[in-house]
Amino acid sequence: MKEVSMFIPCTVDIFLPDIGEATVSLLRRAGVNPVYHRGQTCCGQPAMNSGYRKEAKKAAKHFIELFGNDDVIVSPSGSCICMVKHHYPELLGNEPEWFRRATELAPRMYELSQYLVDVLQVTDMGAAYRGKVAYHESCHVLRGLGVSTQPKKLISAVKGTELVAMNQDDFCCGFGGEFANHYPDISESMVEDKVQNYLDSGADLLILCEPGCLLNIGGYLSRHHPEKRVMHLATFLAQAGREVR
Amino acid sequence: MQISTEKFTELAKKGVEKARARPFLKMVPHFLYQMREAGLATLPEVSAAQAYGAAIRSEALNRLPELLEEFEKNATANGAKVFWARTAKEANEYIANLATERGAEFVIKGKSMVTEEIGLNEHLSEHGIEPWEADLGEFIIQQMHCPPFHIVGPALNISVEEIRDLFMAKAIMKEPTLDPVELGWAARLFLREKFHRAEFGVTGVNMAVAETGTIINLENEGNIRFAKSSPKTQVSVMTLEKVVPTMKDALHLIRLLSRNCSGQKISAYVSMDSGPKKESEIDGPEELIIVIVDNGRSRIYQDPQARDALRCIRCAACLNICPVYRQIGGYAYGWVYSGPMGQVLMPLLLGLDKTQDIYRACTLCGACKSVCPAGIDHPNLMLYYRSMDLSADHPFHGKKRPWREVRFFQAWGMAVQRFWMWNLGISMTRPLMNKNSHNGLIREMKGAFGGWFRKRDFPPMAEKTFHEKWEEIKKTH
């Protein structure tokens, strides 16, 4: 069986491990064997986004050492994939050997839904869910990787599920890592708008492919609209027909 | 103009409150964005046209010194005079002296961002020469003593009621009205008298064509053309980066600028000046003076990465799509430029130390980059500024970060390469964080994460991380 290496983002590892488990289960259902390197830590985004490039570079080198020999690396986070694909070569631009390894690694990195649909060519994950679902186009998934049709195909293939349109589905939810904590006035206003659009869409579930957005939208929903739910696509596909209502 | 970039957070809060009170404010950028979409759709191949624009701007910047010399040579041959100003002060003093020498009592102005940047109006007023803004939006904010809310629509946040009250208070009209057309007429009649007596006009420049020595202005109200053609003396102020190699390049940028700005295929007025009035011509200024302002740009030019910030053609597509700009509006940015274009330009002009929030208050969503006709990667530039800011001795005046943050990332950097240390850190943090958890949710946490918890919850750390669970998962699934 083909082996696929998983990068489990630190947010998933620490706070949302069910997304990791769902990733394992989906890859197995799709007929590949997920492999997990125990040495993995973080892709380096927090340091990169705060300007600490020296530290981000350490994360990059660690990642390259660990995943450098894998044919395919899949992750349930668009922003981590963007970090490795786009920022590693830039960070390591003045170290020729590392730069070569970073550029060679980049095309082998896939966001989960992208890998399932584009590479494995599966859309029907055998899930069933009766209800209306809206999809939030996370910034790094959509604009960073150009991934948009793939998750929608996977959602549409779920039996009984209706994918409904949502206004400003491609607008940032206001997470932005440290941004959400540092500029709460702006960030809260952004997530309020996002949630309003979700409520207006008539969907009873919001699906996305980015753990950061999940923490932000989920954190706001649990405080203000506890009856409304937001889920990572992996969890939705893995659980639909089982735990989900 | 008072620069208040250091008060960003406070001003942003006010902006959010205003936008909440008047949802219309959030809708305007959205309408402008929709107009842009429709305008761009008239091009046969949108992405190719945008990429061509980016290539033109890239070439122009990479050849900047030689193109500026070529432009000066050709503009001079056309009969224009070129004055090089290293600083805002040099430009202001030169223009004020010139106006005094020409005996001008007042100056009529076409809409221009660079004269806002250098603070020309204040300087002229201090020297007894009254500047009159002739663009309706600029006229309104000049009368109100407000900064521009938006680089293209400086007064788009001002309600008709406010404009009515302003026009009555300043005796710009006699009878109060809320009809926008009537209000426009009142301003027009008021300014028409200034135009008739104008001896001295000042405008900006959208593009300066090196090949022909031509300066180009785009507008919809006709005030720039008026300010360029009726006075005897025309002064056109431009910054270094306005130069483009050829007329063909300029024409393509006109296509892109009009569409990206307002969704028009071409703006209502496009004026091209190659020198002052010629003997055979019946109108136009007797003398044309082009003031080329550096004001920190040659230093930006020297940094090949930061240089990309100078690609901007001021279409404002990035403002209209920016989710942060839509929440806070233009005043929060604290100076003349706003939105993503301001966030990448102002830190270089004012210093990284005075603009720390300007390049940090961004979620890196990339919407700006996706619409930019000049190929600017705003998020990546902001990441670059954040990294430069860590070294205090940088040419753009970086400032050291708080020691807690520095220490945190040093420790983080140690652990990120050593998974055992990383996982040890997680196990040690878990009880500290999870003691705040009630019924499987953290609703409040003291200390550094207060911003998050004002309106949001956070999940507690998992009893077992994925890492700790892996052996089980491997078997059971």
Image (cartoon, rainbow, N blue to C red):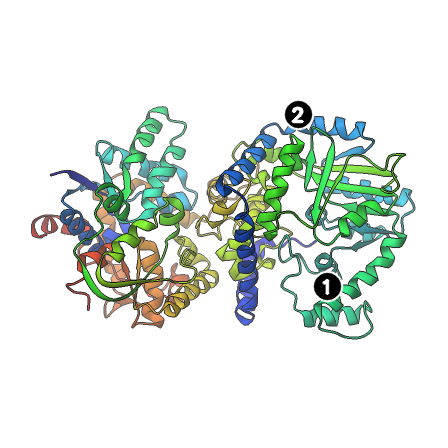
Picture residue at 46% right of the left edge, 43% below the top? B383
| B187 lies above or below B131 | below
Amino acid, disc 1: Met
Q: Where is residue B242 in the image (x, y as percent from the top left)?
A: 66, 37
Q: Residue A55 carries which label?
A: none
Residue B241 visible in the shown view: no
In the rendered image, the residue lying farthest to the bottom is B176
Answer with left or right where residue B451 lies relative to residue B353. Answer: left
Same chain letter for marks 2 and 1? yes
Mark 2 or mark 1: which is in front? Answer: 2
Residue B238: which quarter of the image?
top right
* Chain under disc 1: B
Q: Position of residue B175 (x, y in %)?
A: 80, 75
Answer with left or right where residue A66 lies relative to residue A83. Answer: left
Q: Where is residue B420 in the image (x, y as percent from the top left)?
A: 20, 43
Answer with left or right where residue A117 lies relative to residue B41. Answer: left
Residue A65: which quarter of the image?
top left
Picture residue at 32% right of the left edge, 53% below the top? A210
Amino acid, disc 2: Glu
Q: Residue B144 carries which label?
A: 1
Residue A45 visible in the shown view: yes
Q: Position of residue B399 (x, y in %)?
A: 52, 44
Nearer the observer, A47 or A101 = A101
Nearer the observer, B412 or B470 = B470
Q: Residue B66 carries which label?
A: 2
| Separation of marks 2 and 1 at Cα, in angstroms | 42 Å
In the rendered image, the residue lying farthest to the right is B103
